[in-house]
Amino acid sequence: MSTTLQNLVNQPYQHGFVTDIESDVAPKGLSEDTIRLISAKKNEPEWLLELRLKAYRQWLKMEEPQWPNVKYPKIDFQAISYYSAPKPKKNLNSMDEVDPELLRTFEKLGVPMNERAKLAGVAVDVIFDSVSVATTYKAKLAEVGIIFCSISEAVRDHPELVRQYLGSVVPVGDNYFAALNSAVFTDGSFCFIPRGVKCPMDLSTYFRINTENSGQFERTLIVAEAGASVSYLEGCTAPKFDTNQLHAAVVELIALDNADIKYSTVQNWYAGDENGLGGIYNFVTKRGLCKGVNSRISWTQVETGSAITWKYPSCVLRGDNSVGEFYSVALTNHYQQADTGTKMIHLGKNTRSTIVSKGISAGHSNNSYRGLVRIAPTAAGARNYSQCDSMLIGEQCGANTFPYIQVGNPSAKVEHEASTSKIGEDQLFYFAQRGVGAEEAVSMIINGFCKDVFQQLPMEFAVEATKLLGLKLEGSVG
Amino acid sequence: MIYQDSKTLLAVRKLHATVNGIEILKGMDLTVKSGEVHAIMGPNGSGKSTFAKVLAGHPAYEVSGGEVAFEGNNLLELKPEARARAGVFLGFQYPIEIPGVANSQFLRLAYNTVQAERGKDELDPLEFDDFVREKMKLLEMNPDFLDRSVNEGFSGGEKKRNEILQMALLEPKLAILDETDSGLDIDALRIVAGGVNQLANKDNAIVLVTHYQRLLNYIVPDYVHVMESGRIVKTGGKELALELEARGYDWVGAEVKANARVSL
């Protein structure tokens, strides 16, 4: 590969700064005492502590999964701090009282914490290390009965709702990292959209890991009652550290009859440097349950960061005629590794699912799509369409596709298409001969490649994602 | 056409170039003035296409000697995109497919890039759409081409029309058309050649690289050059092409060898 292609993917990470803020950090290490400490710090009810301990005891018996197509040294779970929170100056009554250092941090990241800000119209819950520091537009949303707050607040103010749904989609012992999360999760967002309400604005959570050697274990729970609908956005960044940080989140979505949840992620965790040093291990369990008839859950993700991504946003299609969608762009560069995809579990009749996955590999990275489509014997008339495309930039990277298809009902229809392409020197020369430099050329090719996914993103997010991919690839083509 | 007050656009002196360490161009000389149409002919492997790619700056070719001046400036020190913006256009023998990128997007990006370089206004998508549709009429192209991916699934003839459409949009000073006639049926050849003729004027120049004389029935050259073993061995007027068509290339080589013996 010539130098032009090389230089294009090597843009420095823009969000790698550390905020100097006094934090309350728990000592490193994991034990029942750690869990009791977290629970006590958050003044949690007894049932939640019991749930955590149950998860922890299951986790102790579990094995770290070996099947993903990723390689990393064994994680020392005793070397991680499981709780880190910026020390509050006092109890907050409004956004104006948020620590100005935090406001500046998020301003720098382009996250609107000020309700009067230009990017208004999106309600934001901001998570800094282990805790939620602010949620905007709460009052306005409450007028239509929507609850949007940190999960800690939800536990305090709406314990019956949290208790009913928490762990109902991802059980505490679901998998190794989900069990860990269930034991030690610190904060996250909670959304509840009551019956018949269409959420008037996009809801958004912004995650920021600030402290070195801390893990982030957030928990998000979104419930849309019958006939409700919501569009939810998630963004994330982290400072640059030479060490790896663990991010093991769990997201649960529940859609009742005729409800509609759209969940969009632009993931831009720190990916490590060009030699693969540092970066986030992003081991995340995301699952949506289409519990009611005609319900719909749609996942859209743009994965650009993380040293390692292990993530399969999934849909369990239990309600008849329910719809699951997964649109994904996963970009890896340098020594990043991604093993990502989805699971579509068809249980109800005439359930439908669509999978569109676009993997882009550059540098020495390795990018795998892993997907499961399971049609249960009960899922008469179920349909699935999957499309998995890979694009390679340069000679040192890899792309894999691991589709698993299990069909238990003869009336089901399952389609799978896959392709692999490469950005070649000849394509770049063609652009150059028309006056267009390599960076713009790659950006145009990549955007064309990802078009089907970007179309699914809300407007501002789509613009953001386009820019992000451009930045990530800068210097990779040459 | 040859004009009295024309200026030199391209001056190639003793150009040597290699690909994968093998020397292909071995002392190429060529001067092209504004308003002129040159045809470069020659047998397979004589270095015609290499010459075209070297002028455009293809990264696989390395210049190992000689000089190329474009409007008096050293062309060889410019990156390919800078050469294009300066007004050097290569019509590709095998236009490259770019899946997922709409032709309209690609054409507008190229157009605006070159416009910006010339200090002229860029066009927004709607303005550009009107503008490009006008240009497409010149080549009898269906507007559907705008929505399709660049060259993907295009027939040979469609690809070549798309090349000349790009030439029409970018208005280069020097257009090097590499085997633009290959793969064209007689109707497509007429349309493509008609397009090129309409674009030719006294300020620009065209270099046709071709195997066959038939293109030259439609685009009449002022000079015909014969390449062999990496350099031009014979230059004549348009009648030379007819002679080549009738007699093949072997006699040119024989004549060159004979002349070489005489000069010894």
Image (cartoon, rainbow, N blue to C red):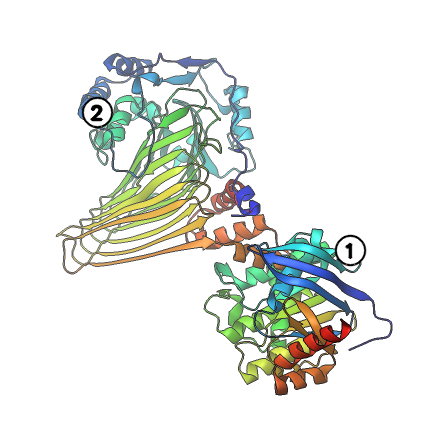
Query: For mark 2, what is the residue?
Result: A59
Is residue B127 visible in the rendered structure shown here?
no
Which of the two residues, B198 or B18, is positioned nearer the viewer here? B18
- Choose top left, top right, bottom left or bottom right for residue A42: top left
- Place of residue A190 in the rendered image (x, y in percent of width and height, measured from the top left): 34, 31
- Along the line of sight, the residue nearer the viewer: A40 or B207: B207
| Kind of element beneath mark 1 | strand
Outermost residue to the right:
B5
Q: Quadrant of residue B24?
A: bottom right
Q: Position of residue A447 (x, y in %)?
A: 49, 51
Q: Nearer the viewer, mark 1 or mark 2?
A: 1
Q: Around disc 2, counting alpha carbons within 10 Å, would you say few (fewer than 14), some (14 to 19), or many (20 or more)? A: many
To the question of a shared chain for discs 1 and 2, the answer is no
Q: Which residue is mark 1?
A: B73
Q: Amino acid at mark 1?
A: Asn
User: Residue B92: x and y, percent?
Assistant: 58, 67
Residue drawn at the location 53% of the way across and 71% of the way down: B159
Single out the residue that lies furthest toward the bottom.
B246
Instruction: Write down the quadrant of residue B173 in the picture.
Output: bottom right
Q: Do we see residue A395 in this rendering?
A: yes
Are the two marked residues, 1 and 2, in contact with CB atoms closer than 8 angstroms? Answer: no
* Camera-side residue of A191 and B211: B211
For the residue labelled by badge 2, is the local secondary structure a helix, a strand or a loop? helix
- The residues tagged by marks 1 and 2 sit, at their Cα atoms, a distance apart of 71 Å
Which chain letter goes with mark 1? B
Q: Is residue A186 above or below residue A350?
A: above
Q: Is residue B255 above or below residue A131?
A: below
Q: Chain of mark 2?
A: A
Q: Position of residue B75 (x, y in %)?
A: 72, 56
Q: Amino acid at mark 2?
A: Trp
Drawn side of residue B50 relative to residue A308, left or right = right
**Mark 1 Cα-neighbour bin, 10 Å: few <14, some 14–19, many ≥20:** few
